[in-house]
Structures are given as C-alpha cells and as structure tokens.
Image (tube, rainbow, N blue to C red):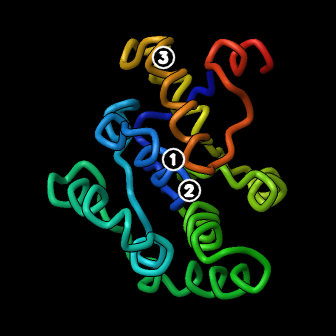
Amino acid sequence: MKKIDPHKKIILDADVIIHFVKGGLIGVLPNILPNKMYVPDIVYQESLSRQYQTPIDNLFNFKLVHELEIKSDLKVFAEYNRLKKLFGKGESACMAYCRYNHDVIGSSNLKDITNYCDEHGIVFLTTMDFLEAAYHRDKLTEAECDEFIYNVKLKKSKLPCNTIAKYIANK
C-alpha cells in the first residue's frame, strides 16, 4: 500500500470519482484516508457528466470533498493550458496543480499521468490504490472490495483485476 503524508491534499480526477459512483461506494471514498480531498473546478464543471451530478454534489454539500480553483494561480493555470493540448482536461488540471503544490493526484489514467508524475516527483493513487487502502484500514471487507470491482466493470469501466486479493498479490 502506498504511504502518503496525511497533511497533503488529494486532488481527484473524474475517473476515480466515477468509479466510486459506479461501484456504489462514493460515500466511502472521502473516508478512506485522513487527507482532505479536492476536485479541481475544471474537473467538476467540464469532466463530470450530468448522470453523476447528484452523488458528486452531495460530496460537496456535506463538505466531504472541496472544490479547488485552478485559474487563480498563474503558473498552475499556464501549465494546465500547456498540458491540456496533450492530455484530458481533468488529468491536466490535477497534474498542473500537484506539480506546483506538491500534493497527491487521485487518477487511474496511468497512460497519461505516469511519465509526468515520475518526472516531477508527484505521488498518485489509482482507484485500486484507494480500494486497497480501504481494505487494509478495515473500511471495506474483501467481499465488499470484490463486489465494488465487479460493479465498476459491469458498468463498462476498466480496472486491472477482478479481486482485491489478485491486485495486492500482483503488486
């Protein structure tokens, strides 16, 4: 399990949030780790479709997740504008913010973020990393993790394995 500083913010991309909505555990996500979780305004406004609006609004309304304004920091916004020519808006917003603020990205889009994060020393957590943390912290049982994976895959999202045990064994 990845260790992260509990004082760092976790900056969530849409894919992790959508996975937790599809898996029926969106209410668990903000309670897995002690870190405060944020969603960049760009991700919230442009990347999260209407079908996910109610559960995501509930996260904000109950102050479980906070909105993060990207445009207010010029160097972050300039990096975001450079990155969005190469990657999706959500990944770009998260990477730009974390590059200059040294926080943690929550994204499963490894194809887009891995090289950039490695180059700039940015820690990232995938949906499966969150799930593994929930399992090890006794927030979810093995059966609940496996049901989550099954439900996410049933709703046409990709995860790297079919069980939490297999994920942990393959690391």
| Element on which disc 1 rests | helix
- Image quarter (top left, top right, bottom left or bottom right) of the C terminus: top right
Q: Residue at x 74, y 58 (%)?
A: 113
Nearer-the-camera pick, 14 or 163: 163
Q: Residues within 10 Å of mark 2 (few under 14, many from 20)?
A: many
Packing grade of label 1 (10 A; few <14, some 14-19, many >=20) is many
Q: Which residue is mark 3?
A: 135
Q: Amino acid at mark 1?
A: His
Three-letter amino acid code of the residue under disc 2 = Asp
Q: 141 or 147: which is nearer to us?
A: 147
* Closer to viewer: mark 3 or mark 1: 1
Q: Position of residue 131 (x, y in %)?
A: 52, 28
Which residue is located at x 34 percent, y 46 percent? 36
- For image coordinates 56% across by 84% down, the residue present is 77
Q: Earlier in the sequence, mark 3 or mark 1?
A: 1
Query: Mark on residue 15?
Result: 2
Residue 82 location, quadrant: bottom right
Q: Are marks 2 and 1 in contact (CB under 8 Å)?
A: yes
Residue 142 location in percent, x, y?
50, 12
Residue 167: which quarter of the image?
Answer: top right
Callout 3 secondary element: helix
Is residue 66 rendered to the left or right of residue 43?
Answer: left
> Where residue 42 sits in the image (x, y, percent)?
47, 78
Say which quarter of the image contains residue 45: bottom left
Residue type at mark 3: give it. Tyr
| Residue 65, x across and y down, in percent | 30, 54
- Label 3 to label 1, Cα distance in Å? 16 Å
Could you tell whether 138 is left or right of 4 in the image? left
**Vertical arrangement, residue 68 with respect to residue 73, above or below:** above
Distance, label 2 to label 1, CA atoms, is 6 Å
Front position in the image: 56 or 64: 56
